[in-house]
Image (tube, rainbow, N blue to C red):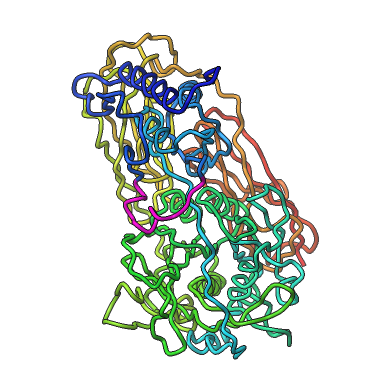
């Protein structure tokens, strides 16, 4: 919905404020549910400049100082928000959806030249949006080259040779470089590169347009033992280039997040992001959380400002600082609570644009070194959960600075040999304990009308995969990231008591017991038919989807091979089956709208030649779909 004619910004802002105010007043829950959604008491407050709305990330002064995409906002949508209400909200705000980040329940909005703070304030007070943030812009993190070509002395700092005695990596463990692209014909990279993606231009041209990504890729996984150029940490691991930047080396929040999501869906277990300062960016960290719940781990450089940052720790990504050749903190390496670990970051000899080599400095190159060590650890045991890999890296790091963890070195200097040795000795605990879940709002038997906010608290020993909310026994919406909150439009409900039920699943497939709370709806129209009045159709003829992340179709296998698939559905998943040559060999019950599942195929005794591996998924409405690949037993 657009306003016709020649309106100036102030007039348009007043119109937005008035419509939003009117909409909010009509949707306020009643009585004990009144605190669920508070209306704007003064509509003039919606109109104004940047000073009238505080973006949460701007509480970090380093983030607040960053440039941002002047027309763009990133809005996180409440699970359960109805499509018609979202469309109405977009029209009221005068914005256009230019990109969907469905995996993190977000959309990118073009504000069409309006004041982004004004639009953000209006959007933040609508029932359908959980959060609104800017799309910040980040520079690649590197300092000037060291003129002394030198040698790769940093390998001895991280005890790489000891790790290589055990493993030089695995061709099945992909490393994604989310950066400026990678030079496709570099002699130390060409044989390692898999097809990548260009997020910036939305095509498959992932060539390096700035020079940074090529050096980052070489630090992590340049071809080694080939009598050419340099060595990487992870010799055998393939590289997946993901370009997210423009030609100046600048990338926005939304594109970095989209790059992480694409890499996860492509099957990358290790993902490196050498932009900064990202530690307070909610959109990027949400993408990192998506990666972690999908079985991947994101590594991010801490930045090269040489200052203390106020960002807090975040378990969804590993933030890497830099040390010099004497194991002392590099002068440029940022510090703070968010620093997890350090690696060499000065005079790092690596691959460069123009099929050349050179020395570079920066946390940009410390981060892929730790990512490469993680790839070695994962190559020892591809079934490790991300939390296990991270714990191994942290527990084996060499303590530097003051005893224990500190804000300069984190847990210490990464030790490749000790990490790989620990991986050999680690038996991952099988988690059979389901999560526990409870409602924190609304209160039981509270009265509500319009949109009602439901919030759920979940406790689990490992990562939570999702929380499924049902209304009167019918699956309603799924939330995949903290805080677990839902928006429920009760306008189409029948008046009376309705029951909300929540069930949580963890990444091991354990499902919690259900918890419930009741609401008393007043002012409902009773126009819906599901669950005693939910205003959506009961019919579901949309089949679930399955994507096999790895191995790649046409791959060769020799013995056992690990497989991974991502399953999604518009309502609720129910069951997944793995088939080999048409015979079911494994099945399990699943839930939620998105699950990442794994299967280990023991091909030791099967005949040589081609075999068809299929994954079949079924949703709660008994819709089914099947996806398959062909593998060749050598």
In the rendered image, the vertical position of residue 571 relative to residue 633, given as above or below: above
Q: Reply yes or no: does residue 64 show up in magenta.
A: yes
Query: Does residue 524 appear left or right of residue 604 in this picture?
Result: left
In the rendered image, the vertical position of residue 85 relative to residue 163, given as above or below: above
Q: Reply yes or no: does residue 116 show up in magenta.
A: no
**Farthest left residue in view:** 32
- Residue 184 location in percent, x, y? 74, 66
Magenta residues, start to end: 56-69
Which residue is painted at 37% across and 15% down in the image? 491
- Residue 228 location in percent, x, y? 73, 85
Along the line of sight, the residue nearer the viewer: 585 or 412: 412
Give residue 211's quadrant in the image: bottom right
Query: Does residue 486 appear left or right of residue 248 in this picture?
Result: left
Give residue 195's quadrant in the image: bottom right
Which residue is painted at 43% across and 81% down in the image? 323
Along the line of sight, the residue nearer the viewer: 21 or 37: 21
Along the line of sight, the residue nearer the viewer: 17 or 556: 17
Query: Does residue 319 appear left or right of residue 451 in this picture?
Result: right
Q: Is residue 152 visible?
A: yes
Which residue is painted at 45% across and 48% down in the image? 283
């Amino acid at each position: 919905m657009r306003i016709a004619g020649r309106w100036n910004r102030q007039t348009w802002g007043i119109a937005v404020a008035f419509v939003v105010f009117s909409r909010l007043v009509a949707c306020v829950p009643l009585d004990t549910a009144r605190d669920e959604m508070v209306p704007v008491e003064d509509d003039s407050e919606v109109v104004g400049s940047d000073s009238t709305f505080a973006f949460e990330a701007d509480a970090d002064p380093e983030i607040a100082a960053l440039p941002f995409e002047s027309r763009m906002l990133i809005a996180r949508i409440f699970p359960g928000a109805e499509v018609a209400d979202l469309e109405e909200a977009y029209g009221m705000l005068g914005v256009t959806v230019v990109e969907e980040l469905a995996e993190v329940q977000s959309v990118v909005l073009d504000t069409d030249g309006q004041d982004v703070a004004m639009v953000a304030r209006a959007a933040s007070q609508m029932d359908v949006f959980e959060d609104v943030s800017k799309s910040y812009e980040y520079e690649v993190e590197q300092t000037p080259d060291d003129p002394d070509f030198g040698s790769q002395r940093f390998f001895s700092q991280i005890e790489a040779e000891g790790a290589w005695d055990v493993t030089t990596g695995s061709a099945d463990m992909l490393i994604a470089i989310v950066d400026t692209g990678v030079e496709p014909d570099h002699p130390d990279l060409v044989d390692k590169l898999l097809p990548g993606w260009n997020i910036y231009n939305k095509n498959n041209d992932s060539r390096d347009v700035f020079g940074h990504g090529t050096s980052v890729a070489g630090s992590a996984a340049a071809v080694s033992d080939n009598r050419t150029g340099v060595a990487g940490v992870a010799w055998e691991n393939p590289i997946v280039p993901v370009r997210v930047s423009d030609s100046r080396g600048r990338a926005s929040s939304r594109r970095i997040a989209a790059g992480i999501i694409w890499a996860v869906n492509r099957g990358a277990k290790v993902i490196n992001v050498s932009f900064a300062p990202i530690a307070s960016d909610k959109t990027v960290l949400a993408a990192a959380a998506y990666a972690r719940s999908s079985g991947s781990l994101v590594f991010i450089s801490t930045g090269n400002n040489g200052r203390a940052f106020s960002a807090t720790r975040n378990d969804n990504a590993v933030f890497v600082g830099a040390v010099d050749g004497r194991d002392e903190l590099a002068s440029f390496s940022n510090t703070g609570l968010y620093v997890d670990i350090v690696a060499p970051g000065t005079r790092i000899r690596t691959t460069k644009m123009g099929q050349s080599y050179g020395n570079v400095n920066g946390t940009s190159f410390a981060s892929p070194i730790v990512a490469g060590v993680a790839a070695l650890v994962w190559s020892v045991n591809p079934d490790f959960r991300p939390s296990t890999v991270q714990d191994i890296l942290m527990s084996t790091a060499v303590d530097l600075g003051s005893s224990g963890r500190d804000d300069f070195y984190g847990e210490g200097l990464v030790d490749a040999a000790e990490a790989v040795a620990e991986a050999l000795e680690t038996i991952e605990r099988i988690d059979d304990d389901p999560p526990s879940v409870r409602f924190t709002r609304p209160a039981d038997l509270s009265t509500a009308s319009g949109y009602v906010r439901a919030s759920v608290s979940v406790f689990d020993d490992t990562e939570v995969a999702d929380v499924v909310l049902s209304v009167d026994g019918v699956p309603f919406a799924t939330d995949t990231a903290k805080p677990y909150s839902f928006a429920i439009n009760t306008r189409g409900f029948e008046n009376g008591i309705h029951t909300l039920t929540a069930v949580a699943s963890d990444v091991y497939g354990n499902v919690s017991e259900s918890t419930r709370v009741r609401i008393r709806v007043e002012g409902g129209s009773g126009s819906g038919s599901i669950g005693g009045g939910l205003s959506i159709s009961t019919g579901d003829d949309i089949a679930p989807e399955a994507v096999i992340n790895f191995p790649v179709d046409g791959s060769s296998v020799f013995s056992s091979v690990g497989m991974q698939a991502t399953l999604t559905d518009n309502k609720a998943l129910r069951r997944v089956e793995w088939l080999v040559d048409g015979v079911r060999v494994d099945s399990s019950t699943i839930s939620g709208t998105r699950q990442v599942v794994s299967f280990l195929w023991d091909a030791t005794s099967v005949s040589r030649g081609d075999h068809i591996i299929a994954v079949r998924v079924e949703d709660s409405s008994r819709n089914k779909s099947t996806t398959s690949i062909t593998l060749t037993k050598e």
